[in-house]
Structures are given as structure tokens and as C-alpha cells.
Image: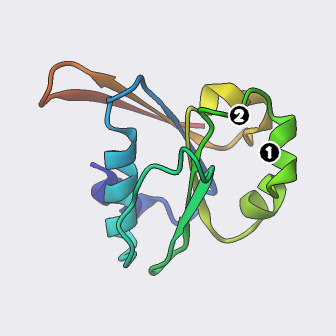
Amino acid sequence: MGRELAKSMDSVSVIALYGGLGAGKTAFVSGVAEGFACRQRASSPTYNIVNEYYGSRRVCHFDMYRITDSERLFEIGWEEYVDSDALCIVEWSENIEDALPDDCWKIVIEKLSDTQRKIQVIKC
């Protein structure tokens, strides 16, 4: 799904991901990165906060699980990432909703079983 959606993400700057542990958020990011022909394999940036993948478009993969408020974001240069040409994909975006741009896409991933997911895409 991420690989297919990447085809329509050229003008999107931020994607806010929602879903519980094990829902498939990082797998979704992997698909998007593949869609932009990124060479690096996507992995969870829980301890790094952000991982960057390079291909036909730079993909910045954020994990806000350890971020408790948006003030911490400005210390890592959030505004510079959002204002760049990169696609910023944010896991645990509910922790920083007040810092998300109004035109971000929201993607909700619901785990139905070990092999099935319900994915809702909301284009703002």
C-alpha cells in the first residue's frame, strides 16, 4: 500500500501515521521508501527520533513515541525538515498533533489480525 501511495505523494510534505504497536506503521514507511526507490531499508527510528532514506525523493521517518510534546521537536529541527523537499512521515503523530501542518495526510492503520490491516487515508 505504501509503495502504491508513494505515486501520489509528490506534493505532500507530511504524513501523520496513527496505529498501535505492531499495526504496521514501519512496514508502511518501508513501502513508501521503496516507492521512491530509496536504497536504505526502513527501520524504526525509536531511539534516533528520525531516519533519512534517499532515493528519487528524500524520506524522513520520524518516531514520536518518546516525544511528549511538540516543544522537543524544535530542538531537532522539525521546521527545517517540514520546509524542505523531503517527505516527512511521522509515527506516533498523536504526540505532536499541534506541530503538524494543516495540509498533512493522516493515515490510520488498524490491525485486524496477524495478516490483515484496515488502512484509512485522509487527505487534508
Residue sitting at x 86%, y 51%: 75
Closer to the camera in the image, 70 or 66: 66
Element type where label 1 sits in the image: helix
Residue occupying the far top of the picture: 112
The image shows residue 30 at horizontal and vertical percentages of: 34, 57
Dots 1, 2 in contact, CB < 8 A:
yes
User: Quick check: 90 left or right of 4?
Assistant: right
The image shows residue 51 at horizontal and vertical percentages of: 55, 61
Q: How many residues crowd mark 2 within 10 Å: few (<14), some (14–19), many (20+)?
A: some
Q: How many residues crowd mark 1 within 10 Å: few (<14), some (14–19), many (20+)?
A: some
Residue holding disc 2:
67
Is residue 104 positioned above or below 13 on the image?
above
Is residue 62 positioned above or below 108 on the image?
below
Residue sitting at x 81%, y 63%: 80
Instruction: Say what amino acid the circle numbered 1 marks.
Output: Leu
The image shows residue 10 at horizontal and vertical percentages of: 52, 66
The image shows residue 64 at horizontal and vertical percentages of: 63, 37
Q: Quadrant of the C terminus?
A: top right
User: Quick check: 109 left or right of 88?
Assistant: left
Instruction: Say what amino acid the circle numbered 2 marks.
Output: Ile
User: How far is disc 1 from disc 2 in space, using C-alphas?
Assistant: 8 Å
Residue holding disc 1:
73
Residue sitting at x 58%, y 62%: 11
**Mark closer to the chain start, 1 or 2:** 2
User: Quick check: 24 left or right of 121?
Assistant: left
Is residue 108 positioned above or below 80 on the image?
above
